Image: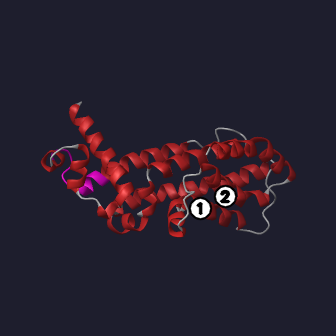
Amino acid sequence: MADLNTKQKIIKASIRLFNENGLANVRLQQIANEIGISPGNLAYHFRNKEAIIEAVNEDLHQEAAEILSTYRIYPNLIDFDNQLSKYFSFIQKYPFYFLDMLEIQRHYPEIQSKRLPQVCKMISQIHKRFDFNQNRGLIQAEPQPGVYKSVSDAIWVLITFWVPQHLIRGTETFMDVSEFKQMIWNQIHPYFTEQGVAEFEQLIRPLLKQKSSGN
């Protein structure tokens, strides 16, 4: 049990340091110092930095899979809003995973190979929501072929690059869940039918106002 606790401390400390300094800038000595152990003790649990990154990725992969599993639990727009809350919490917990995306792709191909199927599943789920809510009468018929696929791709880009684009522009609102959700719902809102607008105003708008006032 002591070994497990030490491993978990190393993983949590590594995540903190990756978030603060970036994946490439964290050394094993820093991780050891963070939790007050010697580099030799750290090496006993993880032979090198790559092994730590692999362990962190296992946690990331599992949490992302759990978010993707929360799909179509509710038969209304609340379903997507709840999933957006989970995506936002994931972004808050692991900003380095998005900020260091190219670093991961270039230097950790095994991690990228696990990430890619989840990316495809995420976009597919968003796209399927257009079909599902079109059948419910909430979404208009597609204006032309491929529009909803493009909007789904755009929503994925917004989620994935939420933190990087804020840091590039020097804005400080990337921790505002209401702004995050509002920007994503704005991609969908133009395609609502009158029935869709009514459900959005009834179910989603109060949540956005509530979360906004709480920030």
In this rendering, is residue 203 above or below 180?
above
Residue to which mark 1 is pinned: 158
Q: Which mark is residue 185?
A: none
Range of residues picked out in magenta: 44-53
Could you say where residue 79 lies in the image, as x and y percent from the top left?
Answer: 66, 42
Colour pattern of the rendering: secondary structure
Count every numbered label the image shows and give the total.
2
Q: Are marks 2 and 1 in contact (CB under 8 Å)?
A: yes
Magenta stretch, main secondary structure class: helix
Tell me which corner region of the image, top left, top right, bottom left or bottom right, holds residue 102: bottom left
Q: Is residue 68 visible?
A: no
Could you say where residue 131 lies in the image, as x and y percent from the top left?
Answer: 72, 54
Numbered disc 2: secondary structure: helix
Could you say where residue 61 lies in the image, as x and y percent from the top left?
Answer: 42, 49
Q: Residue furthest left?
A: 40
Q: Residue furthest right?
A: 194
Numbered disc 1: secondary structure: helix
Q: Earlier in the sequence, mark 2 or mark 1?
A: 1
Residue to which mark 2 is pinned: 183
Q: In the visual, does 153 lie left or right of 28?
A: right
The structure residue drawn at horizontal position 75% and vertical position 41%, both measured from the top left corner, is 203
**Cα distance in 3D space between marks 2 and 1:** 8 Å
Pointer 2: residues within 10 angstroms few (<14), some, or many (20+)? some
Q: Amino acid at mark 1?
A: Leu
Q: Amino acid at mark 2?
A: Met
